[in-house]
Amino acid sequence: MTDARLWSYKEIAAHIRVQPDTVRSYRKHGLLPPPDHVEGGRPFWYADTVRAWAAARPGNRGRRAD
């Protein structure tokens, strides 16, 4: 089953337990996948995109998989 909910920086930050500014920095430095959707200039990612990225990113030491 896929999760098509769109997440903003805030939801991504909560998922990986960092501040939203950290997620913005990840995007600025090319460490975050491209957004799945942009609305009004604001990027959003599907929850499944974020979960796959978070599971594969370096330094992921068994963080929760909401």
Image (tube, rainbow, N blue to C red):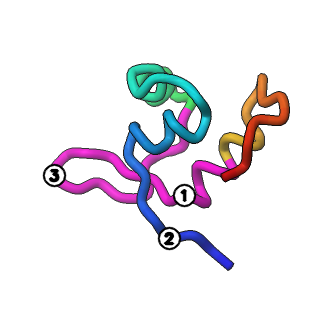
- Image-based side of 32 in relation to 63, left or right: left
Which residue is labeled 3 in the image?
40
Amino acid type, residue under disc 3 in the picture: Gly
Camera-near label (3 vs 1) is 1
Under tag 2, what secondary structure? loop
> Is the C-beta separation of discs 2 and 1 under 8 Å?
yes
Q: CA distance from mark 3 to mark 2?
A: 19 Å
Q: Residue 26's x, y, as percent?
A: 50, 25
Tell me the amino acid under the disc marked 2.
Ala
- Assign a secondary structure to mark 3: loop
Q: Residue furthest right?
A: 62
Q: Within 10 angstroms of label 3, few (less than 14), some, or many (20 or more) residues?
A: few
Q: Residue at x 45, y 44 (%)?
A: 11
Work out how far the residue at label 3 is from the one at label 1, CA to CA, in angstroms.
19 Å
Q: Which mark is residue 47?
A: 1
Verify whether residue 55 appears in magenta: no
- Label 2 sits on residue: 4
**In the rendered view, would you say 39 is above or below 16?**
below
Q: Is residue 47 magenta?
A: yes
